[in-house]
Structure formats: C-alpha cells, structure tokens
Image (cartoon, rainbow, N blue to C red):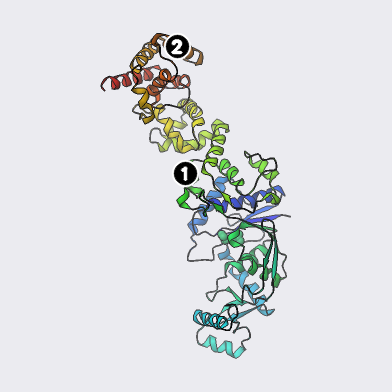
C-alpha cells in the first residue's frame, strides 16, 4: 500500500514550491490507490502559529488536494500534529537509550562548542566529542543536582551511508559527516530530523517526496531508521523551484504564495496543472492535463533532477485556457467575488435570477481576455460603468481626421436601425457605413470600439452592443463626439 504525506511547518504562507511536492505526493498516492496524509510539523514552537495551520489547510482544500488522514480528520496513526506526539518521541528516545543508541547529554551550549573546538584542534571533524556517552549514574545525578536539564543525543556510527533517491539517483554520504547529534532538546522538544523519522515510520509512509534542501538532513534520518530497525521509505528530493533569473524563487520575482495566486483569481486546477510541469513531464509531452490525467500519467521516473524555472507567462497561458474552457456556471461562482470587488455590483445583484443572465453573458464574453479572474475588471468596466477610461493606445485613432465623421455615421446608422443587432446585421451596417464614409479597416472599426468600450481590443462589437443596449451605445458615441469637438 502506497502512503505518502505532506508535512509542512506552519511558519508562514503556503508557497508554490511546497505545494508542488505536495501535489506529486498526492498524485502518486492517488495513482496507486494509496493514502495521502497531512502532518503538521509544529515542534518549532517559536516559529509555528496555529493560524498558519488553518490557512494551509484552507489553501490545500481550495486546490483540491484532499488528504485521507490529517489533523482535522484523524486516522489510524494519529495524532497528526507533531506537538501532540511528544510522548511518542520520548517513548522511542527511551528505547534508543536502553539499546545504547542514544544518551542523556548534560553539556551546556558553551561546553558543546568547546568540545567541537577541541576536536578541531586535534585535526578531527568538528563534532561533539561524545563526552556524555558513558556517564555513570552518579555523574548524572551530580549534573541533575546542579539543575541541568539533559538533552538526548543520538550515537552516530562512523560509517558511510548510501541512498537510492528516485530523483537524484545514488547519493553517497561519506563517513565523518555527522557526529552525535541531539534528537530531543533539553526543553523536551524533538528536533526535526528525529521527529520526522519517528512519524514517517509510525505512520507507515512508503514514499517521501520533498525539496532537496532536505537532502543533507537525510543522512541523519537514515541513521535513525537504521537504529530503529525500521524500513527506509523511498525518497525523492526535488530540486528547488527557481525564478526566471535562476535564483531561488522568492517574493522579488512576483507572487509565490498560494494565497496570492488565489486572490488574483487563478483557477485552482490551472495552478495545479502548471505546478505539475515544474520538474515533471508527461510521457507524450502534453501540457494541459486534467487532474484525472495527471493521476493516470504521473510517475516517479519522469521526475527531473534539474531545477525547474517558474514561468509566470506560461502559468497565465494555462490559466487562460482553463478560464475559457470551464463550464460558465462554475466560472461565474468563482468570479462573483471579483465582480463584487470592483464595487460596481453587489452579490445580491449577481445572484438575482433576473439580472444574472446579463452578468453571465458579460462574463462569457470577456473570459477570453482574462488570464485570471482579477483581470475581469478591465473589461467589466465598460459593461457596468458609463465613465469608463479611454486607454492611451486609443489616442492615435481619436486623432484621425476621419474619426468624427465615422462616429457621426455610426450614431445615425445605429439610431435608425430597428433590427436586433447580431453579427449579420452589424456586418451589413458596417459595409454601408464604410461606403458612406470612405474609411475602412482599423481606422473605421477602432473608433467605434473606442466609443463603446474605451479600448482598442476586446470582444466583437456585435456581441457587446446587444448587452449594453442601443440607448447607452448612442449616449457613448455622442459623448465621445462631444469630447473630440472640444479639442
Ligand atoms: N516540515 C518540513 C518542511 O516543511 C518537512 C520536510 C519533509 O518533508 O521531511 O520543510
């Protein structure tokens, strides 16, 4: 049975880099009809905050990366937050002590540092020298009497370790890399490298996918697996996601947290589709893949060992594809907050069955011009506002000598047109108007568009006109004519 997990530390916003590994773990579990777990690694009590746990669960739910076992759901191997598992860490530490694989260490930080310096002076690797390994009972009691609280230190064997990593290939950790290391601090809290092994072992995790910033930690983890006599899971360490300048992806490249992508209105399935391509590729090279297809096609042997570069343009391209393809009703539900955010319409209006047809029609028209839902505002404005801005690109067309004549003709023809305006009617009108004015092409069409929308591009005029109505269209044309005449 495949069991994978996502084990975030609730110390900040969920980041695309983390979610990418969560996605791979999720896909692999789903592909093999296994389980995907969520475990909260919150033993760093100074940096962890409960609010981030709530936030990250909310983001994962929004993405649709649902977990089978986790802090909110429970499961057979809980609890699923490390802060609630302290007794387990102590129980196993006690076992390791009884077996001679760990010991109480009473050294102060200064003494530890001094011992490392001494090793260095002797020409040895600067590890803790193990002076507490063989304390007698009376020595321990003496330390306790002084009020010292012991840490628990693991006995590191001086041997080499090898890892068959599914992404990196064979990784070799030579001898002497680590000395005896603390697994439980004197304050009773476990360190990451220890807690993660106890948890992955007790939760029967079979595959660990994570960022390669954890690769150097893995040797300590292998040592602990060995000491526990526990099976080592399959490891895959993904190279970190880079920004376009090949530096680690960070805020200075643009948005990076799921919350921000959410706020900009990227559909979750588009974001996941894009993230799946960061370090993985489908066997036939297709890039637009539904969740079902991803689950079907995903495999560990197609994970790439070279770092992936986050390409915002490509994400936009994929996102636009989803926005265009999505069932309109679903897009509408997603778009409601973005409509409301403009301040031009209320949620009640949007939910009013009589008004809804109009808003649905508008959304259907403008969705082809949006990379994310925050973009709807640019095109929504000329459907919902009369004082929409005129974009600077329009200026050369407004300055044309022929434009007042074109607008005037448009006004007159529109006024006397009694048929419902559709594509055919509009084309016929345009043909006549071009004949009448002697103006053709962009110089003819763009002034019309600018009068109605303030923009030089967007949906076809004959789709826009029926939605805004003849009355408003005439007002807009005459408004622009007046503006031009005052120049
Ligand atoms: N809590 C660790 C992190 O967020 C988890 C690393 C792991 O997956 O082992 O980086």
Q: Judging from the image, what secondary structure is the residue with disc 2 in?
A: helix
The residue beneath circle 1 is 263
Q: Between residues 244 and 152, which one lies in front from this camera angle?
A: 244
**Quadrant placement of the C terminus:** top left
Q: Between residues 287 and 104, which one lies in front from this camera angle?
A: 287
Position in image of residue 365 (x %, y %): 49, 27
N-terminal-most mark, 1 or 2: 1
Density class for disc 1 (Cα within 10 Å; few <14, some 14-19, many ≥20) is some
Q: Judging from the image, what secondary structure is the residue with disc 1 in?
A: helix
The residue beneath circle 2 is 429
Q: Is residue 264 above or below residue 223?
A: above
Position in image of residue 35 (x %, y %): 68, 53
Examine the image and state in which quarter residue 98 appears.
bottom right
Position in image of residue 414 (x %, y %): 40, 13
Examine the image and state in which quarter residue 5 appears.
bottom right
The answer to whether the beta carbon of the residue marked 1 is less than 8 Å from any atom of ligand 1 is: no
Q: Which mark is residue 449?
A: none
The mark lying in front, picked from 1 and 2, is 2
Q: Is residue 132 above or below residue 396?
A: below
Q: Between residues 77 and 32, which one lies in front from this camera angle?
A: 32
Q: Between residues 467 and 266, which one lies in front from this camera angle?
A: 266
Q: Residue at x 58, y 69 (%)?
A: 86
Relative to 1, is 57 on the left or the right? left
The answer to whether one can see residue 391 in this image is no
Examine the image and state in which quarter residue 324 appears.
top right
The answer to whether one can see residue 330 in this image is yes
**Quadrant placement of the N terminus:** bottom right
Relative to 322, is 387 on the left or the right? left
Relative to 387, is 34 on the left or the right? right
Picture quadrant of ligand 1 = bottom right
Q: CA distance from mark 1 to mark 2?
A: 42 Å
């Amino acid at each position: 049975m495949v069991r994978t997990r996502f084990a975030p530390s609730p110390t900040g916003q969920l980041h695309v880099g983390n979610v990418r590994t969560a996605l791979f773990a999720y896909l692999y579990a789903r592909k093999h009809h296994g389980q995907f777990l969520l475990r909260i690694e919150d033993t760093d009590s100074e940096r962890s905050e409960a609010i981030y746990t709530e936030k990250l669960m909310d983001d994962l739910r929004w993405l649709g990366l649902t977990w089978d076992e986790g802090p909110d759901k429970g499961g057979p191997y809980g609890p699923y937050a490390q802060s609630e598992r302290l007794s387990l860490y102590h129980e196993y530490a006690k076992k390791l002590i009884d077996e001679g694989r760990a010991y109480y260490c009473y050294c102060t930080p200064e003494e530890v540092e001094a011992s490392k310096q001494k090793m260095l002076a002797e020409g040895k690797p600067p590890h803790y020298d193990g002076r507490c390994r063989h304390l007698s009972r009376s020595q321990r009691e003496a330390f306790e009497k002084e009020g010292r609280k012991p840490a628990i230190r693991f006995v590191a064997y001086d041997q080499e370790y090898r890892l068959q990593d599914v992404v990196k290939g064979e990784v070799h950790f030579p001898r002497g890399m680590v000395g005896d290391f603390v697994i439980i601090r004197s304050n009773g809290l476990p360190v990451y490298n220890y807690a993660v092994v106890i948890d992955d072992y007790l939760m029967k995790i079979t595959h660990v996918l994570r960022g390669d910033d954890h690769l150097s930690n893995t040797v300590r983890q292998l040592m602990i697996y060995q000491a526990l006599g526990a099976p080592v899971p399959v490891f895959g360490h993904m190279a970190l996601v880079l920004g376009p300048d090949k530096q680690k992806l960070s805020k200075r490249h643009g948005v990076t947290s799921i919350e921000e992508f959410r706020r900009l209105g990227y559909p979750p399935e588009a974001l996941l589709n894009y993230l799946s391509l960061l370090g993985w590729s489908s066997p036939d090279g297709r890039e637009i893949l539904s969740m079902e297809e991803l689950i079907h096609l995903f495999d560990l042997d197609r994970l790439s060992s070279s770092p992936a570069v986050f390409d915002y343009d490509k994400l936009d391209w994929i996102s636009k594809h989803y926005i265009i393809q999505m069932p309109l009703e679903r897009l509408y539900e997603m778009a409601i907050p973005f409509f409301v955010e403009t301040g031009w319409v209320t949620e009640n209006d949007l939910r009013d069955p009589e008004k809804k047809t109009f808003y649905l029609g508008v959304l259907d028209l403008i969705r082809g011009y949006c990379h994310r839902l925050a973009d709807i505002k640019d095109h929504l404005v000329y459907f919902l506002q009369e004082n929409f801005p005129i974009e600077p690109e329009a200026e050369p067309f407004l300055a044309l000598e022929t434009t007042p004549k074109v607008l005037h003709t448009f006004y007159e023809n529109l006024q006397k047109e009694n048929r419902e305006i559709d594509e055919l009617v509009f084309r016929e009108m345009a043909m006549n108007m071009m004949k009448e004015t002697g103006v053709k092409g962009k110089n003819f069409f763009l002034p019309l568009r600018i009068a109605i929308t303030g923009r030089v591009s967007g949906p076809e005029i004959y789709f826009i006109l029926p939605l805004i109505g003849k009355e408003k269209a005439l007002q807009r044309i005459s408004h622009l004519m007046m503006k031009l005449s005052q120049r």
